[in-house]
Amino acid sequence: MPATVIVGAQWGDEGKGKITDILAERASAVIRYQGGSNAGHTVVVNGNEFKLHLIPSGILHPDTTCIMAAGTIIDPICLRDEIEGLRERGVSCDNLRVSVNAHVIMPYHILLDGLQEEARGRSSIGTTRRGIGPTYTDKTARMPRSIRMADLMDDDVLRALIADQLEHKNIIIERCYGHEPLDPDAVFAEIAPALPVVRPFVADVRSMVREALANDETVLLEGAQGTFLDLDYGTYPYVTSSHPVAGGACLGTAIGPTEIDAVIAVVKAYTTRVGAGSFPTELEDEVGNGLRERGSEYGTTTGRPRRCGWLDGVALRTAAELNGATAIAVTKLDVLDGLDTVRIAVAYDINGKRHERMPEDLDALADAQPVYEELPGWQQSICEARTLADLPEQARAYIDRMEELAGCAVWGVSVGPSRDQTVLL
Ligand code: IMP
């Protein structure tokens, strides 16, 4: 399966990092296709936990090339910190490459993200404040042209572009938000120390990807965030500013749709969401609190408590379709251990009408009442399960129901954070 997309089927935080890390063992390259340092991918190896924001989750495999493709956006300070943090822990980043065409998150984007959130007041999105929206806005606006990784290679080019950018940005920063203008020299000085660290990684990654595909090597296309945070298909405006859906992998990496062989949709056994926006199966009670505590549902990037709820089968069915999923990977099934019963929303009731898929106008989700199916829970811990036969009958029934709702096979089930705590089917 030369090109495989790994995509989040919910609102992010599905556990894509662990699944990518497992698959990366047999891949020649892992490529991030969208998003930036808003992501938080956790990988646990031999009891050591690694939290990655930018660098692809294949980095812990020394023979796997890790690529940040053109569709991603890069905060050079964050990238420097992540490279240095990994090196301090003995992880070589020699196989990391960043596209010359990836756009750069600058300090003024981070400032603007915060100012915009404040200005939204009660309708704030709850962004990660990592500068994501303002950077993608600049990329598409093209006036003045946004800064790309290629522009970081030359101090004079970079200084001139920062001055150009700030001529426009300072008008907005001062007049719209009443904030002091930024000084171009100070902005340059802020990112200058990161430049010598990140420059060696900037490369023409497209030819590397073409070569890997021509040699029939396996490449993984790693999504960040999740299907319902997609700019077009998510719960707009409570979304991110890129395209996490599998189609975004083609755009972000310049791999054609016909070259993708498999799409693994990663789905947590229950649902979580950080930030504002509709969440039909949200539980604001003891059951929800229990999921948060047992599942350590606190944001990797911002530390915010995640909103928790039952598995949303309507979202799962819809995500499988939107992504053309060929399989699902179920994560955190062990968090449901010990519950008397477990629930799955199999439809929504929206103003008296039954919906089995998410409506295209996602504003309607605000009125969606989940129609639940109740299944028996299981009372024992499943953390030690390594084969399907090790799982209690009730857990197998739960997985079967997820498979039916997704309309595709289960690739594997994660029963704990470590690599080996996985039931591969
Ligand atoms: P932004 O991507 O920082 O602009 O945030 C937009 C929305 O996406 C907010 O609700 C964030 O909480 C959410 N979000 C962004 N990145 C992630 C992620 O990696 N996991 C979960 N939610 C995310």
Image: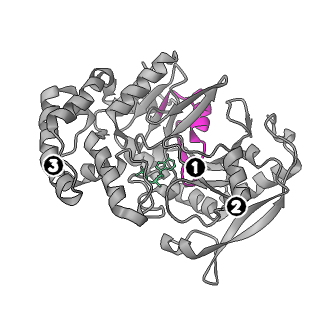
Q: Quadrant of the C terminus?
A: top right
- Residue identified by numbered label 1: 305
Q: Which secondary structure, mark 1?
A: loop
Q: Which residues are magenta?
A: 1-30
Beta carbon of the mark 1 residue lies under 8 A of ligand 1? no
Instruction: Pick the residue in front: 193 or 161.
Output: 193
Q: As drawn, is 248 to the left or to the right of 369?
A: left
Q: As drawn, is 24 to the left or to the right of 113?
A: right
- Residue identified by numbered label 3: 144
Residue type for callout 2: Asp
Q: Residue at x 51, y 29 (%)?
A: 217
Of marks 2 and 3, the one in the foreground:
2
Residue type for callout 1: Pro
Residue type for callout 3: Pro
Q: Residue at x 50, y 31 (%)?
A: 216
Are circles 1 and 2 on residues that touch, CB within 8 Å?
no
Beta carbon of the mark 2 residue lies under 8 A of ligand 1? no
